[in-house]
Amino acid sequence: MLFCTLQLTKARLFRIHNNLGDRIFVGILGNAGKLTPDNGGFELDSQQERDVEVQDDWAGRFWARTGCDDSGNCQTGDCNGQVECGGIGGTPPATLVEITLRGDNNQDFYDISLVDGFNVKASITPADQQGSGYHCTTADCSNDLNPNCPGDLQVTSGDGISGCKSSCVVASSNNDPNKDIYCCTGQNDKPDTGCTGGESATYFQDNCPNAYSFAYNDGSSTFTCDTGDYPYDITFG
């Protein structure tokens, strides 16, 4: 009986692609109450891909960690210097690919989020299987935001600019009195209470209009697709 039960458990597939010129460590984190597949991460060489299987009601995020040594210490998106994040989120800045499977009205919800900043280009695409009837929109940030990142938001390394922080991240680390305005917290925790996202939100929105630029930027940045058995392609770079 146990074997039959396991066989009936539905699953969904994510295909993770590394289109960058260097290897990355992929980070994965399930939302509260959801499992974290592959113990939260793995190494992925340039131009390689790997499949990740999750339950069909899974919700969570994926991100790329860059500038990593063999132990798992990374310049961006780091999770305590581990190859497998094991339930730990990535240190900003990191471009996040977020998804909720089988959400409201039996739809999948997905987005690219720059709320924690940017480190690499990213996209998520519901795979269009011939004859499946699924023709859903790609969510992406297809421009490299690092080269022109405003100076006070830059993360630099020996190779140049490796990431672009959000104004919220910078304000939080500096105890800036405008933190609530940038982070949509405190008295600014609702869309109509003056949260603007700050300098980074303007820069991110101008260059990646399909991505979340700050917390209440969901009107133009959240995409849906009817739930099915098709896979999702997630591409970094």
Image (cartoon, helix red, strand yellow):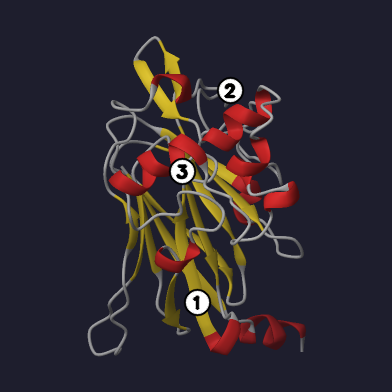
Q: Residue at x 45, y 61 (%)?
A: 111
Q: Residue at x 55, y 74 (%)?
A: 101
Residues at badges 3 and 2 in contact (C-beta under 8 Å)?
Answer: no
Q: Sort mark 2 into few (<14), some (14-19) or many (20+) by Cα contacts within 10 Å.
A: few
**What residue type is disc 3 on?**
Thr
Residue on which the image places disc 1: 108
Specify which label sits upstream in the sequence, 2 or 1.
2
Residue on which the image places disc 2: 71
Residue on which the image places disc 3: 95
Residue 202 placement: quadrant: top left
Q: Position of residue 212 (x, y in %)?
A: 46, 54
Q: Is residue 174 visible?
A: yes
Which quadrant is the C terminus positioned in?
A: top left
State how far apart marks 2 and 1 are (Cα). Answer: 35 Å
State how far apart marks 1 and 3 are (Cα). Answer: 20 Å
Residue 216 placement: quadrant: bottom right
State how far apart marks 3 and 2 are (Cα). Answer: 22 Å
Residue 230 placement: quadrant: bottom left
Residues at badges 1 and 3 in contact (C-beta under 8 Å)?
Answer: no
**What residue type is disc 2 on?**
Ser
